[in-house]
Amino acid sequence: MTELTGWTPVYSGKVRELYIPQTASTVRDADKLLIVATNRVSAFDHILTPEIPGKGAILTSLTRWWFTQLSDVPNHLTGEDPPEEVADRAMVVEPLEMFPVECVVRGYLAGSGWKEYQATSRVCGVELPPGLSEGDELPEPLFTPATKAAVGDHDENISFDQMAKLVGSEDAASLRDLSLSLYSRARDIALTRGVILADTKFEFGRHRTTGAITLGDEVLTSDSSRYWDGELYSEGGMNRLDSFDKQLIRNWLQENWNQKGSPPALPAHLVDHTMDRYRELFQRLTGKAVDNLV
C-alpha cells in the first residue's frame, strides 16, 4: 500500500485499499476514511495479474459522476480532496456502518442468473417465463441480494428472507426498494447514451450521525456492473452482449482456466482491450475524454 502523509493504511481488499487518519487508532474512531482504487482486477474471487493500467482512475471518476447524477440519494463522499499522490483514484468518505450484504439488481438475464435459469427456470428463487434467451430483458428488474465475501471466498446469493434475518425486515425492505429505484434511474440515464445497464450491485451503510441509509463504495462502474452497447444489442446476433466491463476477462478465464489453483496471467492483448472498453464506456456515459479526468 502507498505511504501517504497523514493517513495510515488499515486494509487491502481485492481491488481497493482503505486508510484512516493518523490521528485515529481504528476505523471505529476515525471521522473520515480514504478509499483508494488500485489497478488490480479480480474475477471468480481471485486477484489477477497483471494489473489494468489506469483502471483505478477511470472507475473512481465514473463513481463520482454517478454520485452527481443521483445526488438526491445520500452518499459517503465528504467533498474533501484526497492526497495528491492518489488524487485521480481516491475518495475521502464518511465512515458508515455497512450492511453485510451486496444489493444486486438484475434487469437482464445474464451471468449466473442465466445459468440458474437454464437449470431451474428461476433466478435466485424467482420464477421466470419459459423460453427466455441469454441477454433477454426481464419482465421487471429483480433484487437478488448476496453476502459479501472476503478475499479468496465466494459471494453467495441469498433470499430476501435470509437478508431480512441479517439486517432486519424494515432495513431489508428499504435497501431493496432503494436499490431497484437506483437501478431504474441509472438504466434510463445509460439508455440515453446508447448503453444498456444489464445489472449492477450497490453497497449501503448507515450514517453514524444521521442514521440515514447511505450509498457507499463504488457505484455503477465497469467492475460492479454489466454494460452492453445498445445499438449492437438491438441488432441481435452473436455480438449483442459484447460488454464494456470485466465480463471480457471472465469469458477468457472460462476458456483458459479450470478454476483450480491460481488463475493464469492475462495476455497483453486482453489487458489492452479491457482498458479500451473501460475508456469507451466512461466517454459514452459522461461525455468526457479519459485524459481530462479530474
Image (cartoon, helix red, strand yellow):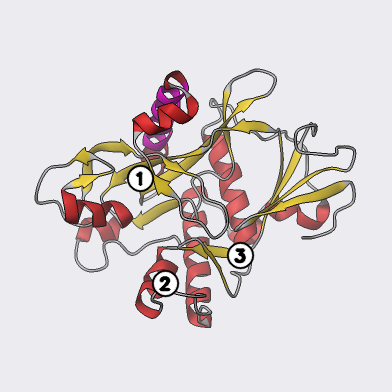
**SS of the residue under disc 3:** loop
What residue is disc 3 on? Answer: 40
Instruction: Give whichever of discs 3 and 2 has the lower sequence position.
Output: 3
Q: Which of the image's four quarters has the N terminus? A: bottom right
Residue at image x 79%, y 34%? 30
Q: Nearer the viewer, residue 43 or 93?
A: 43
Q: Which badge, 1 or 2, comes first in the chain's sequence? A: 1
Q: Are marks 3 and 2 in contact (CB under 8 Å)?
A: no
First in sequence: mark 1 or mark 3?
Answer: 3
The three-letter code of the residue at mark 1 reads Leu
Q: CA distance from mark 1 to mark 3?
A: 29 Å
User: How far apart are the alpha carbons under marks 3 and 2?
Assistant: 19 Å
- Mark linked to residue 259: 2
Q: Is residue 172 magenta?
A: yes
Q: Foreground mark, 1 or 3?
A: 3
Q: Amino acid at mark 3?
A: Arg
Q: Is residue 84 magenta?
A: no
Look at mark 1 in the image and give the residue it sits on: 191
Asked whether the beta carbons under mark 1 and mark 2 sit within 8 Å of each other, the answer is no
Q: CA separation, marks 1 and 2? A: 35 Å
Q: Is residue 109 left or right of residue 162?
A: left
Badge 3: residue crowd in 10 Å (few <14, some 14–19, many ≥20): some
- Residue 43 location, x and y as percent? 48, 63
Q: Position of residue 138 (x, y in %)?
A: 22, 43
Magenta span? 171-185
Does the magenta stretch mainly form a helix, a strand or a loop?
A: helix
Residue at (54% x, 27% y) in the render: 73
Q: Mark 2: which secondary structure?
A: loop
